Amino acid sequence: MSNHDAAIEAVKQQLPSAEQVFAGWPRAETSMPGAFYTNVDLYETGGFEDPRLVLYTGISRLPSLTVGWCLFGAARNVQPGHAALPHAVREALTDTTAVRALQLLAVDHPETDEAAIEALAVPGVTSTLVRLAAAAHQEHEGLSVPLGCEVGTAVYAYHHGPVRMGTLTVDVVLFGSPIWIAKTETNENASTS
């Protein structure tokens, strides 16, 4: 086991899985914000003005619900080869409050967590980010296979569905910032089922 894998394993011991967090959903909604881990079929989108910013969108199928993801990370999670931002994503970025929330989500510093939560609580911001995530997800779907990943993430807010993300409808969209992203399968073995 590498040092990186060992570090992830150590963090996992402190976090619940998404299956545990959402076991009673929707009867007993989980408290947000929070941090947990799960498997996600993930797409990665770059092309933002700030090259350190990257958007991850994806889908997790849990026993009790289907979760859509809208995660923003900083440069340590970025890999080369991003395409230009889709037009619908650029349109969503005209909402200055949503842009502020994105900037806060992408900063890898504990002091920004509270500010990010406050920005996401502004009426209309999560709706704007849902449109942004759906547009980015749609742009990838059909052109590339999502990467099977295990994601540990800090979740700052959620938006109730149903929400259409590509060909699937999700019950809830979660917003946050990745703690780690680890591949669980190669692109050749990835599947959308």
Image (cartoon, rainbow, N blue to C red):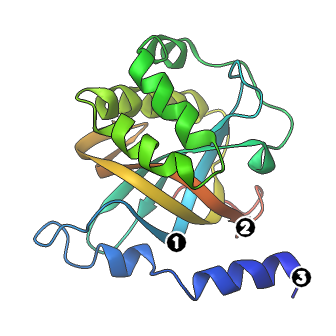
The image quadrant of residue 125 is: top left
Marks counted in the figure total 3
Q: Residues within 10 Å of mark 2 (few under 14, many from 20)?
A: few
Question: Residue 135: horizontal and vertical position, in percent?
Answer: 47, 26
Q: Which mark is residue 185?
A: 2
Residue under the image location 69 percent in, 34 percent down: 53
* First in residue order: circle 1 vs circle 3: 3
Residue under the image location 35 percent in, 82 percent down: 20
Q: CA distance from mark 1 to mark 2?
A: 16 Å
User: What residue is disc 1 on?
Assistant: 37
Give the answer, above or below, for where 158 lies relative to 47: below
Q: CA distance from mark 2 to mark 3?
A: 17 Å
Q: Nearer the viewer, residue 124 or 91?
A: 124
Give the answer, above or below, for where 149 lies relative to 94: below
User: What residue is disc 3 on?
Assistant: 2
Q: Is residue 9 visible?
A: yes
Give the quarter of the figure containing the N terminus: bottom right
User: Mark 1 or mark 2: which is in front?
Assistant: 1
Give the answer, above or below, for where 161 lies relative to 33: above
Residue under the image location 71 percent in, 77 percent down: 8
* First in residue order: circle 2 vs circle 3: 3
Residue type (three-letter) at the residue carrying disc 1: Tyr
